[in-house]
């Protein structure tokens, strides 16, 4: 148990340059507290004491703003940075050396039964506000951009961005020329079409009498 605690503290110090001491991490870091509480809750869950497990997880959620279902399976050196608003579902599985940021959801779509939540591989980073929804796998060493909404499997060594998320890099090489700035704006396109139509109708109204405005429609 103490070896695992030291390992959890060490991973926070390694990944967060703001962490100054082990004592600060133990007493002040909500992500560390949530991981430690989950390990206790998961023990009770796997030993068929679900009420105690849920009591521990809900108490931790009120104190840290991080909700991890006691049924979730979490690997070693799991780091939740900042943490507010993180939600991890019952059938989620998380590998070793995973980092997630505030506002991340590992959830379900409401359409699945049994395995409802994602499986996250080893050494994965999930950016702040990202939503990973469904019973698929996020491959080892992948990166999910902040704010992405992931609805399907992501291969290993990939980078996924956008809503819905698309893979834009695999092993550092671009797989899609996706320009997120110079893209068509459907609202602007529709407004332009409507303005053109209004101009056309105004020209019909202003035509001299005797001409049939419907001939050009």
Image (tube, rainbow, N blue to C red):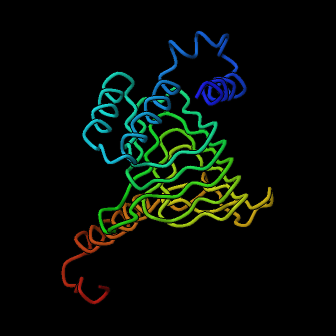
Q: Position of residue 184 (x, y in %)?
A: 53, 62
What residue appears at the point 47 percent right and 63 percent down from the top-left corner? 151
Q: Is residue 209 above or below residue 141?
A: below
Q: Is residue 209 above or below residue 5?
A: below
Q: Where on the picture, by quarter, is residue 177? A: bottom right
**Residue at the farthest bottom position:** 215
Q: Position of residue 43 (x, y in %)?
A: 43, 40
**In the image: residue 199, left or right of residue 208:** right
Q: Where on the picture, by quarter, is residue 98? A: top right
Toward the viewer: 73 or 128? 73
**In the image: residue 180, left or right of residue 52:** right
Q: Is residue 5 above or below residue 91?
A: above
Toward the viewer: 76 or 61? 76
What residue appears at the point 30 percent right and 27 percent down from the top-left corner? 59
Q: Position of residue 171 (x, y in %)?
A: 79, 59
**Residue at the farthest front position:** 47
Classify the position of the N terminus by image quarter.
top right
**In the image: residue 205, left or right of residue 89:** left
What residue appears at the point 39 percent right and 68 percent down from the top-left corner? 193
């Amino acid at each position: 148990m103490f070896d695992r605690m030291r390992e959890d503290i060490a991973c926070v110090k390694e990944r967060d340059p703001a962490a100054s001491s082990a004592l600060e991490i133990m007493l002040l870091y909500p992500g560390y507290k949530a991981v430690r509480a989950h390990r206790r809750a998961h023990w009770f869950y796997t030993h068929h004491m679900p009420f105690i497990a849920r009591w521990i997880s809900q108490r931790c959620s009120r104190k840290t703003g991080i909700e991890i279902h006691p049924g979730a399976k979490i690997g070693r050196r799991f780091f939740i940075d900042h943490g507010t608003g993180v939600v991890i579902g019952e059938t989620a599985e998380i590998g070793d050396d995973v980092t997630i940021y505030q506002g991340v959801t590992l959830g379900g779509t409401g359409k699945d039964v049994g395995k409802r939540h994602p499986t996250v591989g080893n050494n994965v980073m999930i950016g702040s506000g990202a939503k990973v929804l469904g019973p698929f796998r996020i491959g080892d060493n992948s990166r999910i951009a902040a704010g992405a909404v992931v609805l399907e499997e992501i291969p290993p060594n990939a980078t996924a961005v956008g809503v819905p998320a698309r893979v834009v890099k695999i092993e550092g090489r671009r797989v899609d020329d996706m320009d997120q700035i110079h893209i068509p704006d459907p609202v602007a396109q529709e407004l332009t079409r409507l303005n053109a139509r209004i101009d056309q109708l105004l020209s019909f109204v202003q035509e001299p009498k005797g001409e049939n405005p419907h001939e050009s429609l």
